[in-house]
Image (spheres, rainbow, N blue to C red):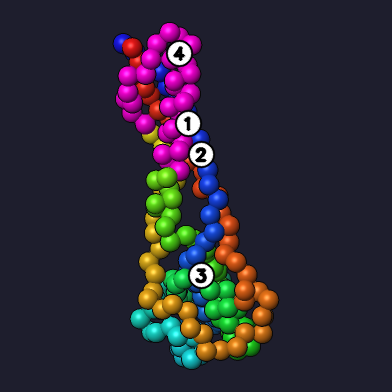
Amino acid sequence: MGTIETKGKAERKYECDMMAVTITFQENGADPTVISKAVMDSCEKFIGEMLDFSKLEIKDIHIDEDNVEEGRYSSDASNSANRTISIQTAYDMKLVNLIRQHLNEGRYRHNIHVDYEYSKVNELHALVVKEALLEAKAQADTLAESLGMEIEGLKKAEEQGGRYTDFMVCECEGGLVGCSNYALTDDLAGKIKTMSVEVNAEWKVK
């Protein structure tokens, strides 16, 4: 009795149906109190606008970061303040467009980042791992046969690569009140991603 080792790979493309929108309001200046207030006022004003043009509720909006930092150099713009909020919800390109539109029209000093993901990524990951393991098994069968042996069973298997986790999602299911100026991109389909898995497997042979 001995062992043989094989590798199996599998991948599947999937369309994202979730998104996480992160918005950072920021200011720079000499007086920390002034820039801190400016950031807090901007954030408060925009949240009010967002609650009006969408059906999001305040419980759907999460604080992410909140900082006022003293600069390293003595200049008029050496200090910085920022406040970051985030929303995780079902994929809705119109909501993204409305958020960006209002940020631009309000001339907010901001950064925005949107991550797209799939709500059943853990289930998909398990399926792709199974497919990779089946490929490794097929290779093991071929190798064992060439050696005049047969596979008795799987001794161990290890996945190479990352881990996948579900998004935390707010209960809001779309329902936008505002009118976006970007009708074509409002209807864009979700981002396409590829999940790739590689498995190293060790098989018992006889």
Mark-to-mark CA distance, 4 and 1: 16 Å
Q: Which is nearer the N-term, disc 4 or disc 2?
A: 2
- Lower position in the chain sequence, tag 2 or tag 3: 2
Checking the image for residue 91, the label placed there is: 3
Residue at (40%, 63%) from the top-left corner?
167
Q: Which mark is residue 145?
A: 4
Badge 2 amino acid: Ala
Q: Nearer the viewer, residue 99 or 155?
A: 155
Residue 78, placed above or below residue 17? below
Q: Amino acid at mark 1?
A: Glu
**In the image, residue 15 lies at what x, y percent?**
54, 59
Mark sitting earlier along the chain (1/2) = 2
For badge 3, the amino acid type reads Tyr
Name the front one of labels 1 and 3: 1
Q: Earlier in the sequence, mark 4 or mark 1?
A: 1
Q: State the CA–CA distance, disc 3 to disc 4.
A: 49 Å
Residue 201 image point, x, y percent: 40, 28
Q: Residue at x 38, y 74 (%)?
A: 170
Residue 139 is a magenta residue: yes
Disc 2 is placed on an element classified as strand
Upstream in sequence: badge 3 or badge 4? 3
Q: Secondary structure at mark 4?
A: helix
Give the CA separation, mark 1 to mark 3: 33 Å
Q: Are marks 1 and 2 in contact (CB under 8 Å)?
A: yes
Question: Left or right: 182 with respect to 163?
Answer: right
> Which is closer to the viewer, label 4 or label 2?
4
Q: Are marks 4 and 2 in contact (CB under 8 Å)?
A: no
Kindly identify the amino acid type of the residue bearing the numbered disc 4.
Glu
Q: Residues within 10 Å of mark 1 (few under 14, many from 20)?
A: some
